[in-house]
Image (cartoon, helix red, strand yellow):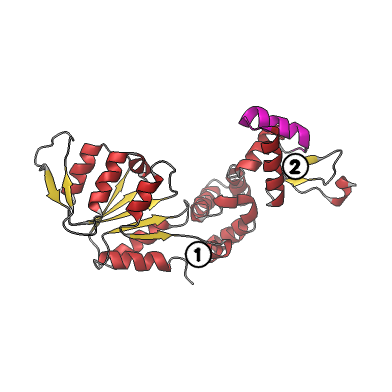
């Protein structure tokens, strides 16, 4: 199954008027925005993209000035942290009767009425669901289509190779794919795009493109690896020393620090020499000689 298929179909249903709102949930770097834009253009939809933060008053004005169009809200998670905005979106996505938007106590703006009937549609892209106002947000999502993009590593690899337009880009992608486990959540399409640009810059500046990519990928590490590196650098560290580091710097209890370490070892984020009395932890696997 094409992992983008639910998103493609949802955009199509929105454009054709079956739904007034579409909520797209997915981690950063999965191509939500690119795919949404591609599908909207393919369907010749009249749409506008809104990015950034905005006051309640200007949100009202923006909605009025773009009434009748599809409005794509992108990189605007702050809007869903304000109850006033959530209430406005509830009115925008009402499923029965007319969708009347009212100014309420917002500051007045010339040429904008105190209330109007909203006839447009909205698409909202989000990376995660915030705990605050969770129930309000669930109610909001239920008024339209809700699509969560869930990709496996194999899905991401397949999409990465589909994106490649040259032998060089395929070679770069081969290099990234080998580092998939180490990159964790950063194994995504944004990282691939960044590496394409680093390759071109390395060629221009007569530098080794693999070393150039490694230089920046070394900063794209998971939280467990980050903490272990901060505590010990690239050298092994005694397990108890790392426990103390976590307790002091994260404010965790001894039990929590130990539980976290056990979890990280199980999922392969960090490595142990396998000894109980002289237990060591490291960013890299221990070879058989070092554990004897």
Mark 1 and mark 2 residues within 8 Å of each other at the beta carbon: no
Mark 1 or mark 2, whichever is nearer to me? 2
Q: Per the image, is 242 magenta?
A: yes
132 left or right, relative to 171: left
Residue where numbered disc 1 is placed: 159
**Where does the magenta region start and end?**
235-253
Q: Nearer the viewer, residue 207 or 90?
A: 90
| Front in this rendered view, residue 109 or 144 | 144
Crowding at mark 1 (Cα within 10 Å: few <14, some 14-19, many 20+): some
Residue drawn 87% across and 46% down?
Answer: 291
Residue 238 visible in the shown view: no
Residue 202, above or below 24: above
Q: Return the x and y of residue 146 as percentages of the image width and height.
A: 38, 59
Q: Specify the quadrant of the image occupied by residue 262.
A: top right
> Disc 2 designates what residue?
282
Q: Residue at x 13, y 37 (%)?
A: 109
Can you name the residue that lies furthest to the top here?
A: 248
Judging from the image, what secondary structure is the residue with disc 1 in? helix
Left or right: where 97 falls relative to 286: left
Task: Tell me the distance, in whole angstroms, between the alpha carbons under discs 1 and 2.
Answer: 33 Å
What secondary structure characterizes most of the magenta part? helix
Residue 113: horizontal and vertical position, in percent?
10, 43
Q: Residue at x 61, y 56 (%)?
A: 180
């Amino acid at each position: 199954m094409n992992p983008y298929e639910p998103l493609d179909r949802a955009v199509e249903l929105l454009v054709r008027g079956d739904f007034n709102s579409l909520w797209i949930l997915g981690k950063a770097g999965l191509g939500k925005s690119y795919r949404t834009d591609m599908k909207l253009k393919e369907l010749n939809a009249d749409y506008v993209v809104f990015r950034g933060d905005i006051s309640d008053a200007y949100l009202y004005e923006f909605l009025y000035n773009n009434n009748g169009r599809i409005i794509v809200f992108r990189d605007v998670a702050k809007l869903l942290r304000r109850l006033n905005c959530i209430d406005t979106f509830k009115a925008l996505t009402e499923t029965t009767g007319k969708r009347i938007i009212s100014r309420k106590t917002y500051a007045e703006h010339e040429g904008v009425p105190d209330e109007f009937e909203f006839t447009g549609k909205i698409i909202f892209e989000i990376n995660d669901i915030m705990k605050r106002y969770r129930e309000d947000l669930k109610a909001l999502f239920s008024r339209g289509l809700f699509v969560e993009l869930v990709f496996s590593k194999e899905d991401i690899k397949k999409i990465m190779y589909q994106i490649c337009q040259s032998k060089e880009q395929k070679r770069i992608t081969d290099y990234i794919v080998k580092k998939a486990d180490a990159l964790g959540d950063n194994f995504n399409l944004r990282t691939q795009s960044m590496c394409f640009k680093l390759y071109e810059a390395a060629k221009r500046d007569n530098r080794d493109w693999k070393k150039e990519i490694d230089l920046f990928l070394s900063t794209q590490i998971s939280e467990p690896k980050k903490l272990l590196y901060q505590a010990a650098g690239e050298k092994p560290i005694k397990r108890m020393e790392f426990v103390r580091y976590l307790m002091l710097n994260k404010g965790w209890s001894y039990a929590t620090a130990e539980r976290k370490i056990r979890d990280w070892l199980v999922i392969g984020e960090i490595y142990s020499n396998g000894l109980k009395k002289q237990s060591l932890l490291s960013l890299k696997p221990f070879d058989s000689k070092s554990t004897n």
